[in-house]
Amino acid sequence: MAQFDLNDDSVVVIIGSGAGGGTLANELAQKGIKSVVLEAGKRFELSDIENDEWTMFQKISWLDKRYSGGGWHGSVNHPTLPTWIVKGFGGSTIHWAGVALRFKEYEFKTRSTYGEIDGANVEDWPVDLEEMTPWYEKAELKMGVTGKTTGMPHLPWNNGFRVLAEGCRRTGRTDYRSGPMAINSVERDGRPACQQIGFCMQGCAIGAKWSTMYTELPRAEETGKCEIRTDAMVLKIEHDDAGKANAVVYADKDGNQHRQKARVVCVAGNSIESPRMLLNSASNMFPDGLANSSGQVGKNYMNHTTGGVYAVLPEKVHMYRGTSVAGIVGDEVYHDAGRGFAGGYYLEFLSLGLPFMAAFLEPGNTGWGRSVARALEGYDRMSGVWVLGEDLPQERNAITLHDSEVDQYGLPVPIVSKTPHNNDYEMTAHMYETSAQIYEAVGATDVYELPAYPATHNMGTNRMHADPSKGVVNAYGQAHDIDNLFVSDGSQFTSSAACNPTLTIVALAIRQAEYIAQEMNAQNI
């Protein structure tokens, strides 16, 4: 395993080891480029994965101090846990469910498609679907996504999705299937086929689901070109007198501080920690934070317009048997202003284990009360969906630094502020009505509307834009203000689209690695 000196200023320092950082590390390593990955959490192995919701929640979740702000329900229901992401080797690719959807063309061009929307900060990406398609294909091949690109069949349907699909058929819908998923349906790439164990969001105990924990990161290390340091919490990014990033300061598990020199710095800490790092790295030259001449660092936080709909059916379903997200309904993913909102949404079948169902059915009750007890009595007859729609960017939705409270590293605590746009309310009402219609078509006796869980899809806050005054990075995730500073995670998203973000993060990371290698070889960075 490679070990690089702290004074080695030829390395690329990558902050974070998830979908963006982990993929970037391996892509660069395969090109012969040296990197040091700084991961804030512990190193995990497959043997650490347990099929238990709460045990794994406590083991892998990022539970450092942070606060919810703004007018969203999270300020009340989850005041100190606005997001549900992983702090550890592999990042949130341990926790994700495996849904691997591409953006639609219009979702890259929301300003052109929707026009100006009052109260929203809608802009076009500096890339489009045609340009991203080959990178999507590379990502799908890398991750092992079921469907056309790999030729792998989609996963089998479970009972919960069969019920949903029949409701779709009876209500005239046609776009429902059990993929694309980055979960092997057959043995592939040294990983086994899915055994339908469930508990996908707690980590795949057999490694059938793609995660950088056991794919990209070990492969990067095997090249001898990548060193991964865990329990390494980044405190700030430093720069030289010319304004180029030249070092990253981090604390180890004992609180000792270290300074790793760098030729290039890539920030991939997720949409809360990445802008927090840039803001915490303010200096005399960059008084508002690194790469923040636009004032957009931390702004435009998006986490999808979501909620849950769970129906009690006349007969037993046992929805928990099989893949956690066993099917996807895409009929509502289109833009039609006549519906009363911009953008579209997916319905994704999602099995919640009994502990999580008790916790999220009526937030605040924490599993208690007559209404909760009555609902849980029908748990074995439930089928349900996670409704997932486009979340419009707003400048007021932002990651900011607390003005007095600090965490265990002495850094200002992040405040995650979110207030829904009217578009969210209109879309959510449509989502709930559509889901209820589908389940009522198959005889649902009760339909429960659940509010959103702590956000797992976190996007924006360091967005791409062709105009340096309107965005933080360019089309390659390269900071407009600092040539050798890159953003490599979902915080570079200009819009959220309606789909799960991981495939797009990986596609962008592969594309970014190609660009970084090109620019390093040309001595431009």
Image: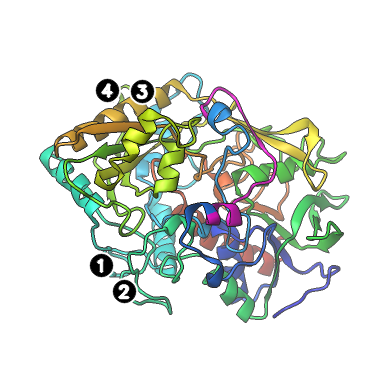
Find residue 5 and report its horizontal and vertical position in percent. Answer: 83, 73
- Please tell me the numbered disc located at residue 338: 4
First along the sequence among labels 1 and 3: 1
Residue 185, visible in the rendered structure:
yes
First along the sequence among labels 4 and 1: 1
What amino acid type is highlighted by mark number 2? Answer: Val
- Mark 1, Cα crowd under 10 Å, few <14 / some 14-19 / many 20+, is some
Q: Quadrant of the N terminus?
A: bottom right
Mark 1 vs mark 3, CA separation in Å: 36 Å
- Please tell me the numbered disc located at residue 435: none
Residue 347, visible in the rendered structure:
no
- The range drawn in magenta is 55-73
What amino acid type is highlighted by mark number 1? Answer: Pro
The residue that mark 3 highlights is: 426
Relative depth, front residue between 210 and 75:
75
What amino acid type is highlighted by mark number 4? Answer: Gly
The residue that mark 1 highlights is: 153
Find residue 390 and report its horizontal and vertical position in percent. Answer: 41, 36
